[in-house]
Amino acid sequence: MCGPGDCGCWHEYPERGWIQFLIMRILYERPMHGYQLLKEIEERSCGCHKLEPGAIYTLLRRMEMRGLVESRWEKVEGGPERRVYRLTSKGVEALRMGLQSIVKRRRLFDDLVSFYYEKFEGAAREGGGEKDV
């Protein structure tokens, strides 16, 4: 997939607005405990986004209070019990609606990126540069 630092990120912590969608997306695929979520987030972001354990559990508690996820304790052979989180039907609907919003926003970003390449990257290659504003 990708290695640490491959994404060209400029900060280590993911923006709070989309991290919940990422958590819900991961839990949609399969239930897991918080430590697994931490590793999944780090892996999917190419090592650019690392949450502190306290932060992930705070987010999960808030999401549970809102009815987006539910948890239960599971026994682990030879170890302590751990809380496993799963997405609720309300969480699935929130994920669907949130992703729908992201798709619409992406269209806007795609337009802005095209504008950038057309007006600034192309102009720089042609020796034009920026226009005076």
Image: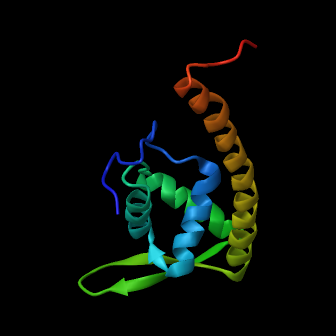
Outermost residue to the left: 78
Query: Please, is residue 27 above or below residue 16 in the view?
Result: below
Q: Quadrant of residue 103?
A: bottom right
Q: From this view, report whether residue 98 is shown above or below residue 10.
A: below
Check the picture and name the quadrant holding the N terminus. Answer: bottom left
Whether residue 81 can be seen here:
yes
Residue 43 placement, left or right of 130: left
- Residue found at x 27% / y 87%: 77
Name the residue: 36% across, 52% down: 47
Picture coordinates of residue 54, whole percent (x, y): 46, 53
Asked whether 74 or 105 is in front, the reply is 105
Residue 14 pos. (x, y %): 52, 48
Q: Is residue 20 left or right of residue 73?
A: right
Image point 50% across, 52% down: which residue? Answer: 55
In percent of the image, x 44 and y 51: which residue is there? 51
- Measured as percent of width and height from the top left, residue 102 is found at 70, 58
What number of labels is visible? 0
